[in-house]
Image: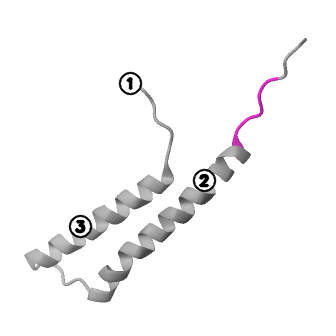
């Protein structure tokens, strides 16, 4: 199986969508009363965090990669 690079921004976006979907579903079923402002602000907050992560991740990844091995000429 082909390995894919780790993408933390996608992970954060997916967890945000999963959490909001679960919260709305539980609220619709009557199992949990979701506070309105919390759910309304959770999506933009999750997307903002995902965007910041996507902007910072390449810099962090470049800084922590091993340098190439020296070539003997």
Front-lying residue, 37 or 27: 37
Question: In terms of sequence position, does the residue under pointer 2 or pointer 1 come before the other?
Answer: 1
Compared with 1, 31 (above or below) is: below
> Left or right: where does residue 50 sit relative to residue 55?
left
* CA distance for labels 3 and 1: 30 Å
Say how the picture is coloured: one colour
Question: Magenta includes 16?
Answer: no
Q: Residues within 10 Å of mark 2 (few under 14, many from 20)?
A: some
Q: Secondary structure at mark 1?
A: loop
* Residue 21, disc: 3
Q: Are marks 3 and 2 in contact (CB under 8 Å)?
A: no
* CA distance for labels 3 and 2: 26 Å
Question: In terms of sequence position, does the residue under pointer 3 or pointer 1 come before the other?
Answer: 1
Q: Secondary structure at mark 2?
A: helix
Question: Magenta includes 66?
Answer: yes
Compared with 10, 45 (above or below) is: below
* CA distance for labels 2 and 1: 25 Å
Residue at (44%, 75%) from the top-left corner? 45
Horizontal and vertical percent position of residue 11: 42, 54
Write down the quadrant of residue 46 in the picture: bottom left
Horizontal and vertical percent position of residue 7: 49, 48
Compared with 34, 24 (above or below) is: above
Q: Which residue is mark 2?
A: 57
Q: Which residues are magenta?
A: 64-69
Residue at (54%, 57%) from the top-left corner? 54
> Left or right: where does residue 11 sit relative to residue 26?
right
Write down the quadrant of residue 34 in the picture: bottom left
Q: Are marks 2 and 1 in contact (CB under 8 Å)?
A: no
Is the stretch drawn in magenta largely helix, strand or loop?
loop
Is residue 10 visible in the rendered structure shown here?
A: yes
Q: Quadrant of the C terminus?
A: top right
Q: Which residue is mark 1?
A: 1
């Amino acid at each position: 199986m082909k390995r894919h690079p780790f993408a933390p921004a996608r992970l954060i976006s997916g967890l945000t969508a999963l959490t909001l979907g679960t919260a709305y579903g539980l609220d619709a079923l009557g199992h949990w009363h979701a506070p309105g402002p919390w759910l309304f602000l959770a999506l933009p907050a999750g997307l903002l965090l995902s965007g910041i992560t996507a902007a910072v991740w390449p810099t962090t990844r470049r800084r922590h990669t091993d340098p190439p091995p020296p070539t003997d000429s």
